[in-house]
Amino acid sequence: MSHLLNNKELKELGKIYDWVSMCTHCGNCKYGYEYGSNSNFAAMLCVQGDKFNFDSYRGSRGKVSLARSLLHNRIGWSDKVAHVLFTCTSCGACQQMCETDIKPWILRMFEALRYEAWKQNVAIPENIKAWSSTIGTLYNPYKEPHEKRLDWLPSDVRSSLPRKAEYIYFAGCTASYRRKQLARATVSLLQKLKVDFTVVEDEWCCASPLLRTGQYDLAAKFVEHNKTLPEKYGASAFITTCAGCYRTLGRDYMMDAPEGYADKYGKMTGVKVLHTTHLIEEMLNKGEIEFTGSFNKKVTYHDPCHLGRHAEVYETPRNVLKAVPGLELVEMYRNKKFSFCCGAGGGVRGGFADYSLETAGKRVKEAEATGAELVTSACPFCYTNLADAIELSKSPLKMEDIVEIIEPIVRKK
Amino acid sequence: MARGNNEILATLEQIVGPEYVSNEEADLQPYTWDMTWAEPRMPDYVVMPKTVTEIQRVLRLANHRKIPVVPYCNGTNIGGLCVPEEGGIIMDLKKMDRILKIDPETCYAVIEPGVSHAAFSAALKATNPQWKGEEFSKGFEFGWGVHPASASVLAMAINHGIGHLNGRIGVNSQLLSSMEVVLPTGEVAKIGSCAYSDSWHSFLPLPRMDGLFTGWLGTTGIVTKLGVWIFPIRPYRDVLSVAAASAEDITKYMVRWRHYSLCDEVTAVSWWLAQIPITFPYSPKPADEPEFFSYTVISGWSEEELAYKRKIWEEVVAKEKAKGTKLIDFEYPPEAKRGRTELPSRIVGSTKNYSKSCGGGIAWPGTFAPCKSWPILYEKWKEIYIRHGLSPATRFTDYQGAHYGMLRCMTPFNKRDPASVQAARDAMVECVRAGLPEGMLPYKPPVEYQNELNAVADAGYMYLMAKIKDMLDPNNIMNPGKLGIR
Ligand SMILES: Cc1cc2nc3c(=O)[nH]c(=O)nc-3n(C[C@H](O)[C@H](O)[C@H](O)COP(=O)(O)OP(=O)(O)OC[C@H]3O[C@@H](n4cnc5c(N)ncnc54)[C@H](O)[C@@H]3O)c2cc1C
Ligand code: SF4
Ligand code: SF4
């Protein structure tokens, strides 16, 4: 049996067929596993497979197989195909487990599949369609007016910020419109740490939701626009508290395929992208931060997929938490490269809210099992989903972002 | 697009619940193929039962309506064994994933079909051998292969799977101790000690009816629970290695060494199998490289025990060298050594070694053969492989003493190229044909090998096999087409 590329219509998918065809259908991607003298880990990591059962939903194998079935003209497009594609949270656990040459291309392949799906008459989740129809003019997926993007920022603070600075604090859409207190806490933290930064009124969505849902054409102007900001504001770096923005600015804007989209949108150069935890860790290491109080709680850290598996930032947030006086850090069973997604990514929170919250509920249960009083993370999007699940399940857990833990108890030495 | 028939779909939905059945092509497509050359075939339904009763009801329906049923766990068997030759129902058993019992005193465990190697190895490692509360050592093990972590232990064991203890205690189907099975006509039967009490420790001294369900490739019933023997993890392990200039020489060494029954495993891999990934297409071996590399794993309860085994091994190597056997010293790569001593491990096996970047195809003539035939067949296979542009990535492994062992040639091929697929299939079928007169028998055989087997089998054996199959599965619903007898 040969696997011939019969369907030439699917251009984006066809372009990466060389890698797609490297999948052996082995199924390593369906389960998280590590064994050895120091490790003994086995757990389901695929959010989608955990919920929807069949092999079509489990790990990348189901989706690679789907891509091949479509490319070989063995099956046609259907609403079910769209369901398989859009219920994956792009958490990257399957990519983590794969060992063949398709590995680095897996997430790119999911996005290419979704790109193709938009061109078919299939049931793209209504809510994704809804925000997609306005994002081009509102520059955020929350259907909020762009003029209100900076409403979270107290006017006195706003007027105190310089127009040009070393860093642009890129708050992102979720913090700007839905988690305003996190954006405010970040600004307060940066001020306390005497960081030379500014906040810009013409920040647009980083394009993460567009890229993750395969809306390549719509994403172009967002990438092009945001890329111009550093020069405009004399900045040499973006700093962000959002894992999604971090991944998008730091990888999609800056790296070649398959890690990024420089092949489509050109490469952003001469600019650094930092997550807030990077900056805090660096200052801690240099001895520039002094704690003015303690945080006497048992805390567990949820790895945002966009910061963890997508960008391999695992230790930085933990190092920051470990430095906090009084804070006891405990790990969930599934952590770091074997973390379990909060259920919000890949457009799933918007597209399938109930399933997304059900997944977050599973994660909350896992956090509860550690005996922690509080779950923390480094992403406002994870925050939203986990906090909603905590509320829904009446969990005794509290939720705070790392920045919110740190901000009240630090000053620059 | 949906397949099958709405009435059957509705009945299946009633049995397992609507979320555990689908007839949508998008859900069916991952079950149409595997890594081998097997022609893709669309099933009509996939069901995911959660209980034995659900399995019984599905089988009764299928038997009544004469619908094929293919038992499926993860489809990683490297034989096209779950590709639904005649469509029908894929019975995906992953939801039945409970480890029902680990008895740390009698040293057996009872598992359901969906228990993965990953989950089972983690659970066994966390259980300590003991007697009346007194713990003797840390952790249990089973015969771990180098499968994808998601692969089913049960599916592997009932199909004569191969694990890292095969030199010490044989292939994994020799470690079975009891089973529960649903017959194609819907009845449930317990086999072994579990038929009499809740002790799942042994098939003996009863008639070995488990043989009706082991090695049958899912064509005689659905095994729903399996008792397997488990073994205390020996805390000391080492890997000893030696290479040789020819298959003949490495076999001489292996036969002498395994004579003492001191190792957990002794394996030799040809130069091509030692390459990561296997060279594809074929390229010649550098003249100064050994033809075969061999490793043997020794284990023990103390450093002294290990030292003793090492000493005997050194004597074996010295004796063979003195006789003129061309053995070459070489150091086993540290990463692979770690993998071998910390099994189960994804380091030593896994698809990255076999098919990292050749175009998705993997298959093998995987066979059990008398060790005597290894060097003879290697030379034949090598010629066949090179003629077809493939690397003779061959493995010899001894099973439990002197009786027989594995002869296998792991074969990557490019699924995007029809000529490559054809060449791989032709080469492998030719290898099987060449091996049968030497006593070689393929395991987990694809249909093409089964046809070769059947063509030369004893007529009485074929008659008995067909009779058993007819008796158990009168409507031939179970994985039809795989045995080549109906
Ligand atoms: C890279 C790689 C390395 C491998 N290494 C090894 C190795 O070292 N040793 C080894 O033994 N194998 C190895 N295999 C083969 C395979 O992974 C194992 O045999 C595996 O355990 C099969 O599990 P599965 O879940 O994929 O079974 P499946 O492929 O789903 O099923 C295998 C067969 O069992 C039947 N079956 C499944 N469940 C039942 C049931 N409950 N009742 C009756 N019949 C049933 C199926 O119909 C099929 O015929 C390897 C495979 C790969 C891809
Ligand atoms: S990205 Fe995550 S949810 Fe999607 S298939 Fe992979 S493991 Fe499953
Ligand atoms: S995506 Fe990777 S791990 Fe998954 S089946 Fe394909 S090769 Fe195996």
Image (cartoon, coloured by chain):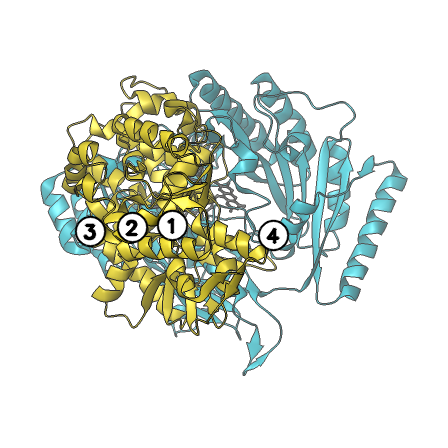
Identity, as a three-letter code, of the amino acid under mark 4: Asn
Tell me which chain the residue with mark 3 is part of. A
Tell me which chain the residue with mark 2 is part of. A
Q: Nearer the viewer, residue B384 or A66?
A: A66
Report, in whole angstroms, how far the alpha carbon at label 3 lies from the one at label 1. Answer: 23 Å
Location of mark 2 (residue): A175
Question: Do the residues at discs 4 and 2 belong to one chain?
Answer: no
Location of mark 4 (residue): B166
- Residue B474 position (above or below residue B271): below
Tell me which chain the residue with mark 1 is part of. A
Tell me which chain the residue with mark 4 is part of. B
Image position, residue A259 (x, y; %): 44, 33
Callout 1: 10 Å neighbours few (<14), some, many (20+)? many
Residue, far left? B7
Residue located at (37% from left, 56% from top): A188
Report, in whole angstroms, how far the alpha carbon at label 1 lies from the one at label 4. Answer: 53 Å
The tint of chain B in the picture is: cyan
Picture disc at residue A241: 1
Chain identifier, colour yellow = A
Question: Do the residues at discs 2 and 3 belong to one chain?
Answer: yes
- Quadrant of residue A267 within the rendered picture: top left
Location of mark 3 (residue): A353
Mark before the other along the chain sequence, 3 or 1: 1
Q: Is residue B63 visible?
A: no
Image position, residue B23 (x, y; %): 19, 40
Kind of element beneath mark 2:
helix
* Of labels 1 and 4, the one closer to you: 1
Identity, as a three-letter code, of the amino acid under mark 2: Ala
